[in-house]
Amino acid sequence: MFSFLLWCLLFVVCWPLALLALIAYPFVWLLLLPFRIVGVAVKGVLEIIYLAITLPFRLLAAPFRL
């Protein structure tokens, strides 16, 4: 909602720039999509490494159940 209000303000101040931003937004989103996918993959790999390293400590800290 805030970004829409900023766009409306830009439209009032400089409507050609606002229309250019409206047209360019999907192309910029498509251009940045591979970086988002790589970011999700890297975050997943780092999470797996973190869990593998901390697993022994979490097992030792867990209360023993009979």
Image: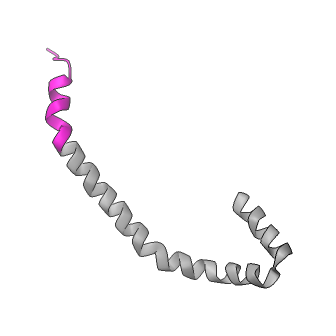
- Where residue 12 sits: x, y (%)? 86, 73
Q: Looking at the image, which is closer to me, 45 or 18?
A: 18
Residue ID at (62%, 77%): 25
Determine whether, in the image, residue 63 is placed left or right of residue 38: left
Spot the residue most to the right.
12
Q: Is residue 40 above or below residue 7?
A: above
Q: Residue 1: tell me if it is visible.
A: no
Query: Which of the colour schemes (rainbow, by chain, secondary structure, one colour) is used?
Result: one colour
Side of 48 where 4 appears, left or right:
right
Q: Is residue 60 magenta?
A: yes
Q: Quadrant of the C terminus?
A: top left
Residue 20 visible in this rendered orientation of the protein? yes
Q: Is residue 39 left or right of residue 56?
A: right
Q: Residue 66 versus residue 21: which sits nearer the camera?
A: 21
Range of residues picked out in magenta: 53-66
Does residue 8 show up magenta in the picture?
Answer: no
Residue 55 x %, y % = 18, 37
13 or 38: which is nearer to us?
13
Q: Residue at x 51, y 78 (%)?
A: 30
The image position of residue 43, as x and y in percent, is: 33, 56
The quadrant of the rendering that contains the N terminus is bottom right
Q: Main secondary structure of the magenta part?
A: helix
Most extreme residue toward the top is: 66
- Left/right of residue 24 with respect to residue 36 in the rendered view: right
Residue depicted at 14% across the width and 25% down the height: 60
Q: Position of residue 50 (x, y in %)?
A: 23, 46
